[in-house]
Image (cartoon, grey):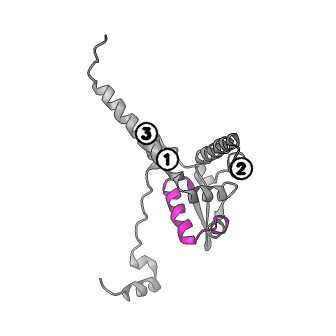
Amino acid sequence: MAVPQPATDDDLLEREQLERVFESVSRYFSLMAEPMRVRIMHSICDGERTVGDIVDAVGATQTNVSRHLAALYQADAVYRRKAGNHVFYGIRDSALIALCRGVCIHIASRLDDEGSHSDGLLSLARGFESVSSARKPLAASQNKPKPANLDETLKPRPKPKAKSLASQGPATQNARSMRRPK
């Protein structure tokens, strides 16, 4: 019988790196743990939409949709583009859409095997299909450097720094000066 060898520094380093990968993969999958995020991704997989359009497509409140869009944006799953008074969202991470499609097809086929009605899931999966075949990335996203590893992909984006009062104009300065002190 072989005697177990003590772990080397290289073995320990490899285990730590593997653990970081597992944690990153878990965070990546957790993005789609909310049904509302799946609905949102489905609604924008055939092209970018305004927040109002997404709200109408998923049948939720603007507050709820905005919260989920912020989480998807922080994880770099979607991009956003401002045009006038509108904010448009689109798919940045087409791999996430491919995963959603694969899972929908898998679950639909399991339900078919059990004799359950799965036409809705097949329709949902077909909707996810349009992103990988038809979507062209924005020029800005084409120039974005690819992350070296999954940890970089899942890092939250830094929050924008607050502008100084002087750069915000007199209306903002007056509104802020009228606030009650804490």
Distance from the alpha carbon under mark 3 to that under mark 1: 10 Å
- Disc 2 target residue: 117
- Residue 37 vs 144, above or below: the answer is below
Q: Is residue 172 visible?
A: yes
The amino acid on which the numbered mark 1 sits, given as a three-letter code, is Tyr
* Residue shown at the point (67%, 65%) measured from the top left: 57
Q: Residues within 10 Å of mark 1 (few under 14, many from 20)?
A: some
- Residue 59 vs 22, above or below: the answer is below
Residue at the extreme left of the image, as rendered = 6
Q: Position of residue 73 (x, y in %)?
A: 52, 58
Q: Residues within 10 Å of mark 2 (few under 14, many from 20)?
A: few
Residue at the extreme top of the image, as rendered = 1
- Residue 56 vs 124, above or below: the answer is below
The mark that comes first in sequence, 1 or 2, is 1
- Disc 1 target residue: 28
Q: Position of residue 9 (x, y in %)?
A: 28, 27
Kind of element beneath mark 3: helix
The mark that comes first in sequence, 3 or 2, is 3
- Disc 3 target residue: 22
Residues under numbered marks 3 and 1 in contact, where contact means CB atoms less than 8 Å apart = no
Kind of element beneath mark 2: loop
The mark that comes first in sequence, 3 or 1, is 3
Kind of element beneath mark 1: helix
Q: Nearer the viewer, mark 3 or mark 2?
A: 2
* Residue shown at the point (72%, 45%) measured from the top left: 133
Residues under numbered marks 1 and 2 in contact, where contact means CB atoms less than 8 Å apart = no
